[in-house]
Amino acid sequence: MSRSSYQVRAYSVKHSYDISEFLRSYRLILQRAIDEIWANIRWIEKFNRKGRRRLIPIIPKGNEFKHRHLRSLLMDGWEYSKHYVDSAIKQAYS
């Protein structure tokens, strides 16, 4: 059996950038993504064997919703790179 190994290196780089505005903006689009996903959940009513009612959430996972509707909604007014919006969408679904 061959075992592959790899090394991950991380470096800290000092900078004088104020990233508090970016972090606040990212947190807001993440919350906006979660709110939009939550607003588009469909609830289906099912009954178990004993006749008890259960509500099953159907979360919108299609590309039409994720990449067209949600991404375009979050990109409106976003002044940073697009991949942060994609990251927020991915994190909202996790």
Image (cartoon, helix red, strand yellow):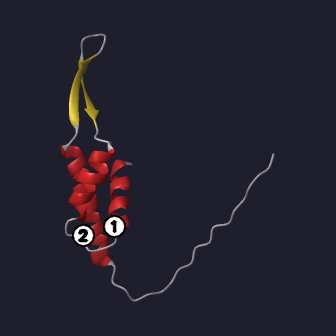
Q: Is residue 77 above or below residue 59?
A: below
Q: Regarding mark 1 in the picture, which secondary structure is present there? A: helix
Q: Is residue 13 above or below residue 46?
A: below
> Which residue lies at the image location 27% right of the left edge and 34% below the top edge?
58
Q: Regarding mark 2 in the picture, which secondary structure is present there? A: loop
The image quarter in which residue 40 lies: top left
| Place of residue 9 in the rendered image (x, y in percent of width and height, measured from the top left) | 62, 72
> How many numbered callouts?
2
Amino acid type of the residue tagged 1 in the rendering: Lys
> Which residue lies at the image location 28% right of the left edge and 46% below the top edge?
64
- Residue under label 2, please give it: 78
> Which residue lies at the image location 35% right of the left edge and 48% below the top edge?
93
What label sits on residue 82 in the rendered view?
1
Asked if residue 31 shows in the view, the reply is: no
Q: Is residue 14 above or below residue 30?
A: below
Residues tagged 1 and 2 counted as in contact (Cβ below 8 A) = yes
